[in-house]
Amino acid sequence: MTTDANPPADANPPAAAKAPAKDPWDLPDVSGLVVGVLGGTGDQGRGLAYRLARAGQRVIVGSRDAGRAATAAEEIGHGVRGLENAACARESDVVIVAVPWEGHAKTLQALREELAGKLVVDCVNPLGFDKKGAYALVPEEGSAAEQAAALLPDSRVAAAFHHLSAVLLQDPAVERIETDVMVLGESRADTDVVQALAALIPGMRGVFAGRLRNAHQVESLVANLISVNRRYKAHAGLRLTDV
Amino acid sequence: MTTDANPPADANPPAAAKAPAKDPWDLPDVSGLVVGVLGGTGDQGRGLAYRLARAGQRVIVGSRDAGRAATAAEEIGHGVRGLENAACARESDVVIVAVPWEGHAKTLQALREELAGKLVVDCVNPLGFDKKGAYALVPEEGSAAEQAAALLPDSRVAAAFHHLSAVLLQDPAVERIETDVMVLGESRADTDVVQALAALIPGMRGVFAGRLRNAHQVESLVANLISVNRRYKAHAGLRLTDV
């Protein structure tokens, strides 16, 4: 099997063959969207909130605790607001889920109503750690993103932003973050929005990389990047070549 | 969770903390090794055999059928020999497994003796295809590489070369293949050898990316790369940034 392997002849749905070839880099204007970040007081969420706000986006960080959210927002600056999770979800158009895996299901279950009709972008990596390092956990639903989709039937769920270094995201001296963001989802309209958000961050590019059923390997690849980072003392990111 | 997330304090084995920091790019001389490629008549195997032989390595392509192996070897040129799988395994120092997933277990079971004492490099991607495209299959052992390790207790098993485009590998007009090769394995000596082999191919770099228990996501990421290739009409490869 190779990356350009020929699938069975019927692997393309007929619609794909007939659709006019849209320029995959023709992405929507997302400047008017409010982006909420659940888990916005953690390293990953805080880093993403900082980068998006620094790029001019309106951003709200959410936390279980409104006070901690407000403190984080103040520390991040760039006009970021901090709200309790439910209010953050309600007031946002796009909601990034950056909570620890341990709290993933519980957080989303509690926010089902507030997240109805929203585009939810899961960036959670279900990982375990032991003496040998990190390893992939396999959620019952297949992946964190598929768990989100199962728990949020009234939301549109995409997955992205899995492979970022929180150290780089949060370091104000870092001007560019040279990495591609793999974006997964079921709807082209939704993945285009997420790609456009990723592209707001200098050096970053959002690349469509499949449906949610292929999210597990993207989420758990972080275990490999942690190994890379240890061996090479790096903050490794991914680039897709020839794209 | 982020790629530089702090694992629990005991996640590092004590030896890692004490070991002198070896230059991770100080790789062994592999020029004397004979490389066998099981499944060397398929697109991926043929492409790898061609690239390694073109770089000066002694290469044997293996096939179930000695005649087909000989024909493939002649077509590849660059001094490549073609042998039936068992002879290919016997006469090689390092054996790349590039057979279709469907024949993976059966092929390796039959070669257990011939592969004893060898370094076996699995590059098989267990994938299924349906109308929605490619998706990951989950082998009972966790991954193709772990299946190989289970079936070959007397061999040393590594995993690598999963994300290559057979089109690029086989195109003689392509001088460089700009991609990193994630190399997984349990022994530093073994993964160093595989990294050195990857580095023989211009543009390619072997990067240590974890233990075999983290092979599944590397193998199945090909499903995502197939989505990338379809959307962007590309032969996508991966680069690790900051490494």
Image (cartoon, coloured by chain):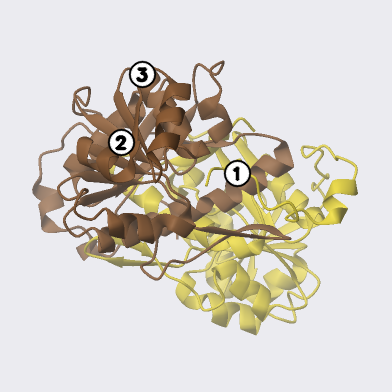
Chain colours: A yellow, B brown
Answer left or right for B50 relative to B21.
Answer: right
According to the picture, the residue beneath numbered tag 2 turns out to be B36
Above or below, A103 against A226 in this view is below
Tell me which chain the residue with mark 3 is part of: B
Q: Residues within 10 Å of mark 1 (few under 14, many from 20)?
A: some
Q: Secondary structure at mark 3?
A: loop
Image quadrant of residue A64?
Answer: bottom right
Between disc 2 and disc 3, the foreground one is 2
How far from the left and from the top, in percent, is residue B3?
42, 51
Q: Residues within 10 Å of mark 3 (few under 14, many from 20)?
A: some
Give me the residue at 28% from left, 29% from top. B196
Visible in this render: residue A53?
no
The three-letter amino acid code for the residue at tag 1 is: Ala
According to the picture, the residue beneath numbered tag 1 turns out to be A5
Image quadrant of residue A221?
Answer: bottom left
Image quadrant of residue B55?
Answer: top left
- Answer whether labels 2 and 1 touch (C-beta < 8 Å): no
Task: Say if labels 2 and 1 share a chain.
Answer: no
Task: Say if labels 1 and 3 share a chain.
Answer: no
Between disc 2 and disc 1, the foreground one is 2
Which numbered disc covers residue B55? Answer: 3
